Image (cartoon, rainbow, N blue to C red):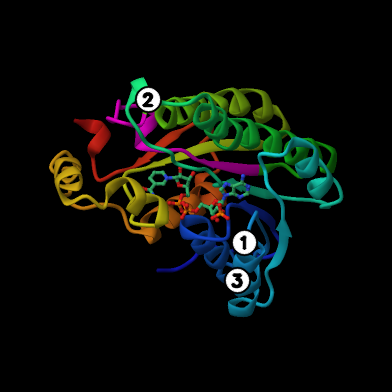
């Protein structure tokens, strides 16, 4: 595929240590962007830099408000942001603990909000516009068994996307979400490796397969690039048709 050129763009990717975020960071580098990978496990950043020496790294737990503020305050001008970091904790509604509830909302919602606020303030001051992509999920719009709080965090991510699009649009900052179906990353395996569960989900996906990491990365790159210059506040399923049914 012909990659859109992102030469000269500085991009921040959160949760870039593993899975979709790691692949996104590498793909953005291949598009010519200057990539800053943010995650909380240093060994993941070390191996990423070994594979792609041009990638810059920041190690921080985004659930920690002050640490995030400190880690990102001197980041300099940023053109593009991918809010990808999130966690999944599954279990029956009646058994969800306060701790699990708080962890999920702290990472999946509060950190997404906070990182966006810091980076968007910088984008506004810089005056060159920008684009933000939030990695949400099909779980934002369908009830999935044992995913109570995860589903709620992704619904919140969708609405943050829309309100950010509304308020940041006048500063020429576009904000969109991608909403993948299951992807067999570490997170996907945690929730969907049981063949009976995964067969039930697969039967609801018209294309009959889960998403590959590349399917999600392609959608993210499209929404970051000028190819989507008039798309703002969109919630883009990458789900083989799951949400259409
Ligand atoms: P993953 O393989 O678990 O990777 C998530 C990355 O985010 C890891 O590098 C993780 O670091 C990092 N991260 C988590 N919490 C963090 C924190 N507090 N501070 C900094 N970094 C943090 O997950 P994935 O499957 O690639 O998921 C990426 C995104 O896609 C998430 O938003 C997820 O909700 C969404 N999504 C995934 C699926 C799926 O089936 N996989 C489907 C729909 C949507 P550590 O490993 O060090 O914690």
Relative image position of residue 222 (x, y in whole percent): 48, 51
Q: Is there CB contact under 8 Å for labels 3 and 1?
A: no
Within 10 angstroms of label 2, few (less than 14), some, or many (20 or more) residues? few
Q: Give the quadrant of the C terminus.
A: top left
- For label 1, count other residues whose C-alpha is less than 10 Å away and answer few (under 14), some (14-19) or many (20+): many
Residue shown at 84%/45% (left/top)? 70
Q: Which residue is mark 1?
A: 6
- Range of residues picked out in magenta: 131-147
Q: Residue at x 44, y 68 (%)?
A: 2
For the N terminus, the quadrant is bottom left
Image disc number at residue 95: 2
Q: Position of residue 243 (x, y in %)?
A: 27, 33
Residue linked to disc 3: 48
Q: Quadrant of residue 38?
A: bottom right
Nearer-N-terminus badge (2/1)? 1
Q: Quadrant of residue 134?
A: top right
Tell me how far mark 3 sits from mark 1, CA to CA: 20 Å
In three-dimensional space, the C-alpha distance between marks 2 and 1, rounded to whole angstroms, equals 46 Å
Does 237 lie within the magenta span? no
Element type at mark 3:
helix
**Residue 102 against residue 53 in the figure, above or below:** above
Disc 3 to disc 2: CB gap under 8 Å: no
Q: In the image, is residue 145 above or below residue 70?
A: above
Residue drawn at x 70%, y 34% is: 114
> Residue 184, relative to residue 126: is it above or below?
below
In this rendering, would 145 be left or right of 148?
A: left
Q: Nearer the viewer, residue 122 or 87?
A: 87
């Amino acid at each position: 595929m012909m990659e859109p050129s992102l030469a000269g763009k500085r991009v921040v990717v959160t949760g870039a240590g593993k899975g979709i975020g790691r692949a996104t960071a590498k793909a953005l580098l291949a598009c010519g962007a200057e990539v800053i990978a943010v995650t909380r496990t240093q060994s993941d950043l070390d191996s990423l830099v070994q594979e792609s020496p041009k990638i810059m790294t920041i190690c921080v737990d985004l659930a920690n408000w002050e640490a995030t503020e400190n880690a990102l305050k001197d980041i300099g001008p940023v053109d593009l942001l991918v809010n990808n970091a999130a966690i999944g904790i599954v279990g029956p509604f009646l058994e969800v603990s306060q701790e699990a509830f708080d962890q999920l909302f702290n990472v999946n919602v509060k950190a997404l909000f906070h990182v966006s606020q810091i980076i968007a303030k910088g984008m506004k001051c810089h005056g060159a516009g920008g684009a933000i992509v939030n990695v949400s999920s099909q779980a934002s719009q369908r009830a999935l068994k044992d995913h109570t709080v995860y589903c709620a965090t992704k619904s919140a991510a969708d609405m943050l996307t829309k309100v950010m699009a509304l308020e940041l649009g006048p500063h020429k900052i576009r904000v969109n979400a991608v909403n993948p179906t299951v992807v067999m990353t570490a997170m996907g395996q945690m929730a969907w490796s049981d063949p009976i569960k995964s067969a039930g989900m697969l039967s609801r996906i018209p294309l009959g397969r889960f998403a590959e990491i590349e399917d999600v990365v392609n959608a993210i790159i499209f929404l970051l690039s000028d190819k989507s210059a008039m798309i703002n506040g969109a919630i883009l399923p990458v789900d083989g048709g799951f949400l259409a049914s």
